[in-house]
Amino acid sequence: MRFVFASASLAIADATAAAALPSQMMAVQASGTPCDAPDWSCITENEVGVPKPGFGQALIEVRGSSVNPVNIDLVIPECKHMPAPFGCMTGTIGNDGAGVVVSTGPFCHGLKIGDEVYGQLKGAYAQYSLVSCSGVALKPKNLSFVDAGVLPVVAGTSYSCLHALGLPSRQANLTVVITSGQGGTGAMGIQLAKAMGATTVITSASGDGIEYVKKLGADIVVDYHKQDLFDDYLADDSVDLVYDNFGVQGTADRAMHAIRSGGKFLVLLGGNGGTISKNPKKGVDQIAFTFATQNTLPEVAELYDAGKLQPITWATYGLHDVKQSWTDKEAGRFFGKLAVVPSNSTSTATLV
């Protein structure tokens, strides 16, 4: 009887919280018809109903989200050729962020109203969003919602990739290559590699991005406008692990000479055509990484709270500025990550 009474009390508390929520909210949505820059005519800011959490779900008030390549990929004309279950998106955009739990559905274990969380969100470009209770973690205590909101996809991806490569490690003089340093996965990959045991991190960047990645902890930075990382700079048998977060076709073949026997090459599969090598070097393992299946955000939060990682937010945009944020993302005039903040009335974008 005590268990029934406790469950009933929790249900009443959640019902009270839900009753205090507004019935409508603002959200940025896609029409399902493809569009492209600079007008992005298929996305609009609309007033819609606040969703209700179902089994194993929670509703959060969104305090920060991010611009991910996949958000754009699902509306540009190429979305018509995506295999199922993907395709041209309809409905509220956004797939990660941070916020405060305001309501929970049945069997939402481990979360309670008031928890500050970050992780995978369903429709993050909105004032409220649903989350799977198992797909989020408590937000790093020393990060703002905005800085935490840009992390889930890129931090979870890079942590999972480096873990697949064998980190954390106590190997002496461990050298790790991050092929592209100044974007989101690169900015996290550099920091995580150092925090997870790398002695030396090597990456590529250009212009002001060179100093940016050095501040994140990169030890050696190759200017890709002047030298190719694998063809021109790295010597034979000079590195242990390669995290190819950019994934350009042919990178695996060009990287093999530089990887020591016993080392590993991982390519993050995506839209750039990269694959593993068909002729790998003897003694080098290869990994074709598709997506993270495990929630690694608690480990990332622990590293942030230990002071081992830095924020990577470059600029913030309100819901009404999403089109501009996408245009800026496509132009590549930034480092790290761009944030979308539903409560923002003005943009703080200061791009390079």
Image (cartoon, rainbow, N blue to C red):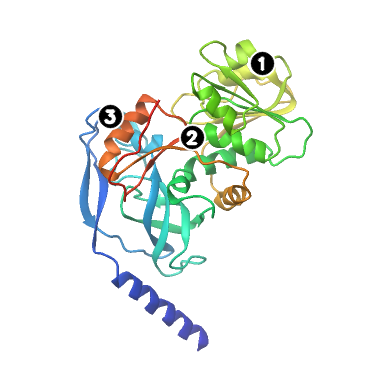
Q: Is residue 97 above or below residue 272?
A: below
Nearer-N-terminus badge (1/3): 3
Residue type indicated by callout 1: Leu
Name which quarter of the figure residue 93 lies in.
Answer: top left
Within-10-Å neighbours for mark 3: few <14, some 14–19, many 20+: some
- At a point 26% along the width and 50% down the height, the residue shown is 27
- At a point 47% along the width and 57% down the height, the residue shown is 117
Q: CA distance from mark 2 to mark 1?
A: 24 Å
Q: Position of residue 252 (x, y in %)?
A: 59, 21
Instruction: Give the residue furthest to the right.
Output: 172
- At a point 34% along the width and 34% down the height, the residue shown is 72
As drawn, is 325 to the left or to the right of 208?
left
* Residue beneath disc 3: 77
Q: SS at mark 3? A: helix
Q: Disc 1 vs disc 3: which is toward the camera?
A: 1
**Marks 1 & 3, CB-CB < 8 Å contact:** no
What number is the disc on residue 234?
1
- At a point 51% along the width and 28% down the height, the residue shown is 182
Of 64 and 161, the residue lying toward us: 64
* Residue beneath disc 2: 184
Residue 79 visible, this orientation? no
Residue type indicated by callout 2: Gly
Q: SS at mark 1? A: loop
